[in-house]
Image (spheres, helix red, strand yellow):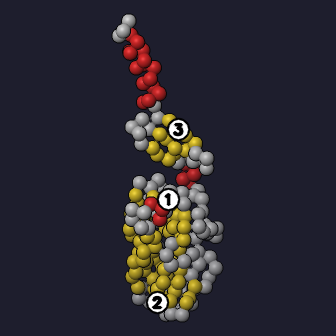
Amino acid sequence: MKFLIPLLAALIATPTFAADQLLRLEDGRQVLLKADFTWDYVVEPSAAAAPQPDAIAVVAQPATVVSQPRGVTFSANQDKPILQTTKSDITVVLAAPHLDGDELVIPTSVINTGLESLIETDLQISISVQGGEPQQHTVKIWRAIKRMASTYLRPGKSKAGNEVRIKIEPAAQYQLEAKISHIETRS
């Protein structure tokens, strides 16, 4: 009889301690509490495909989407985005450009559709006046402060990135190629 009581108690208690538990937070996100005392956010496929904007409005106008470097021709002072490039769940949108003196200014936004927080990302750009010699640039688009989690770009969020500023002669049309060259994330 003394052997039966501890055995029965162990059988009853084991499933409650060893099972993973799914919790829904007040803001609607779900968290999976694991038996090994770790946890993860549960990302539903529809939530990962459509991140919610945080600090900027996600561009609603169509942009050229590329995952490999590809050229796009655009003019300064146009009112729609010129390019969108994606690598490993990180998307960089190059918004409507404008000239500021002898500099071409291209605002950017960064979208994180992955499961890890974004620490930094760089964009490799090749730009030329239509038919001219291309200029090569590597631009730091997003930088968080390492080990300061509040500055990370969280999964499912989007924010304004650093502006791309390139000294270039004014012209009617420019040719641009861009690709994400560096990504650093933290789980």
Disc 3 target residue: 22
Residue at the left extreme?
A: 3
Residue 24 visible, this angle? yes
User: For numbered disc 2, what is the local secondary structure?
Assistant: strand
Residue plotted at (50% across, 59% down): 154
Tag count in the figure?
3
Tag 2: amino acid: Lys
Residue plotted at (46% across, 86% down): 166
Q: Of the residues under marks 1 and 3, which one precedes in the sequence?
A: 3
105 shown above or below 12:
below
Between the C-alphas of marks 1 and 3, the distance is: 21 Å
Residue plotted at (47% across, 39% down): 33
* Dot 1 alpha-carbon crowd within 10 angstroms: few under 14, some 14 to 19, many 20 or more: many
The answer to the question of whether label 3 and label 2 lie on touching residues, with beta carbons closer than 8 A, is no
* Dot 2 alpha-carbon crowd within 10 angstroms: few under 14, some 14 to 19, many 20 or more: few
Residue plotted at (58% across, 56% down): 50
Q: Quadrant of the C terminus?
A: bottom left
User: For numbered disc 1, what is the local secondary structure?
Assistant: loop
Q: Of the residues under marks 1 and 2, which one precedes in the sequence?
A: 1
Tag 1: amino acid: Arg
Choose mark 3 or mark 2, whichever is in front.
3
Mark identifier at residue 167:
2
Query: Hey, which quadrant is residue 120 in on the image?
Result: bottom left
Between the C-alphas of marks 3 and 2, the distance is: 53 Å
Describe residue 42's horizontal placement relative to residue 7 as left or right.
Answer: right
Disc 1 target residue: 154
65 shown above or below 125:
above
Tag 3: amino acid: Leu
Front one among 159 and 91: 159
Residue 179 visible, this angle? no
Q: Of the residues under marks 3 and 2, which one precedes in the sequence?
A: 3
